[in-house]
Amino acid sequence: MTVLGRIREQKLLFVTLLLFTLSVGILIGTLINTAVRAGADPPAAQDATPLAIPNPVQLSTAFTQLAKQLEPSVVNITSTYAARTTQRQQLPRDRRRSPMPSPDEGDEGFDLFRRFFGSPFPNLPEYPFRRQPGVGSGVVVDKNGYILTNLHVVEDANRIQVKFNNDPKEYEAKLIGSDFETDLAVIKIQNGGKPLVAARIGNSDAVQVGDWAIAIGSPFGLEATVTAGIVSAKGREGLGGEGHQLQRFIQTDTAINPGNSGGPLLNIRGEVIGINTAIATESGGYQGIGFALPINLAASVYNQIIKTGKVSRGSIGVRFQKERRDLLKAYGADQGVFIEAVEPGGPADKAGIKVEDIIVGYNGKAVQDGDDLVNRVSNTPVGTDATVTVLRNGKKTDITVRIAERAEVFPSLRGRRLRPEGSGGIEGTTQARFGMTIRPLTENDRERLGYDQKGGVLITEIEPGGFADDIGLLPRDIVTSINRQPVNSVEDVQRIQQGLKPGDAVAFRVMRVPQTRGGEWQAIFAAGTLPANP
């Protein structure tokens, strides 16, 4: 065999051995892999298909667009109250059933619902006043800062603050006017001249049962909450008790809860058709029955308030109850209003209208029922004469009646005003008031309080909702320095104030009375920025 033949034989042997080795490796790997698979658990659901997450797609719906459109116009309202510790602060006035017929109207019916607002007011025994917050909603109706809400959201508040969604700033608001009978109020915020986005006003007369209804507000303080439902009924009345007979509610199953009060009820076009005012509930929360005051009535109230600061309504001074068809028939009438009481000294009394008269006409037009009479009389300008046609002893008689102010005829209907701003502060202060009353420390003060250090002035009163209250100062605190300038007298405080203007930062150092007898006085540091209207 030649050398070349031997080389070829060796190559062939090498290739054969290589192929054999690879075949053995593949065989062993296959056996191992099969054994592993045989030992693994079988799939839990062999016929299931894995879920696939699609790419995000913007779904454009009417509700989505409506929520975006109305978000800048719906506000959260926080009302602050000064609660005296001598007695428990009461919640806003309850709506109670009265044994008397409603003035100029009929029986008020059942007290089905609660107004929804804020949180309970616990006793706080340490100091004469402590601030207590309540929460509601409102809707911007004018770009210059005018907001429509419920009266019970801001009634008797010492301070009103408004917050917009996605805006951390709280805007101070003042009450422009209110109407007790419809439970409406108009407030205004100062926003530095920046135009606001006003909600579009709809026509509540066009609302039909079954229409979509959307509520936006701050239930339980959760801002910009959107809920949807339908209009369940129209013209619900007799729910508010005496003094609220002008209310004719839109009923809805839209979810509304405590904190929604004063917020808007919208139609599917994003127009305001009502102001959410009340709920029927046994639990205090949503049970599918809510009530909104129609925007047509709310707009009429708003227009009067911005014009004169109040709402004026006419009255003739009579009382009656609804659905007295039996009495009407017995007295020879098919329709009209059976008079059960005449207010002494009122317009009807002066004109000669008597109990058992039946009012069948007003200014030449037939009166169908009590609602008809109330609407027409209340819209008659105060001071004008009206012709009232009564049926007496089977004969019709025209009587001229001079229309009077409703709240004057029935004083119980007068709405309560916002508490006046406190007169706290220091005599001779500038616009940079601190919202507190102080006086020099006397030797008797030092002995009585056990305070033996020099200097300082004593805080005797804190204005609820004022600057000092905001930063946590308390009555009986002793101010020792302001902005690191020592304070030894009232004049020192006045001098420091004169050098301050709204927007300046102010830091107080005060000594706080010991929490326990014989304890040590504690140095407290408090600071804040002076507001534009402290």
Image (cartoon, rainbow, N blue to C red):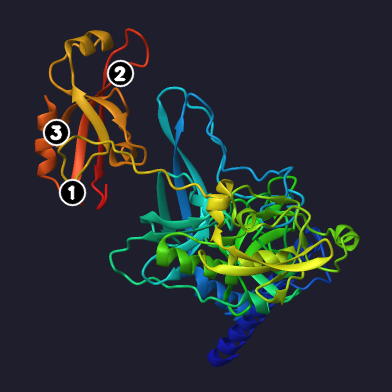
The first of marks 2 and 3 along the sequence is 3
Of the numbered discs 3 and 1, the one sitting upstream in the chain is 3
CA distance for labels 2 and 1: 28 Å
Identify which amino acid the numbered label 3 is placed on: Val
Q: Residue at x 10, y 43 (%)?
A: 498
Residue 139, can we see it?
A: yes
Residue drawn at (37%, 60%), measured in percent from left and top?
Answer: 189
Q: Secondary structure at mark 3?
A: helix
Give the spatial CA distance, label 3 vs label 1: 15 Å
Residue marked by disc 1: 504
Mark positioned earlier in the residue sequence (2 or 1): 1
Mark in the foreground, 3 or 1:
3
Q: Where 321 falls versus 307 (above or below)?
A: above
Mark 1 closeness class: few <14, some 14–19, many ≥20 residues within 10 Å: few
Q: Which residue is mark 3?
A: 493
* Direction from residue 430 to residue 436 in the image, left or right: right
The answer to whether one can see residue 146 in this image is: no
Q: In the rendered image, which quarter contains the N terminus?
A: bottom right
Horizontal and vertical percent position of residue 371: 71, 65
Q: Position of residue 464 (x, y in %)?
A: 36, 38
Q: Nearer the viewer, mark 2 or mark 3?
A: 3
Disc 2 and disc 3: Cα gap in Å? 20 Å
- Which structural element holds mark 1? loop
Amino acid type indicated by mark 2:
Val
Q: Nearer the viewer, residue 344 or 397?
A: 397
Percent from the top left, x then y, of residue 533?
Answer: 26, 51
**Closer to the camera in the image, 311 or 476:** 311
Q: Which mark is residue 513?
A: 2
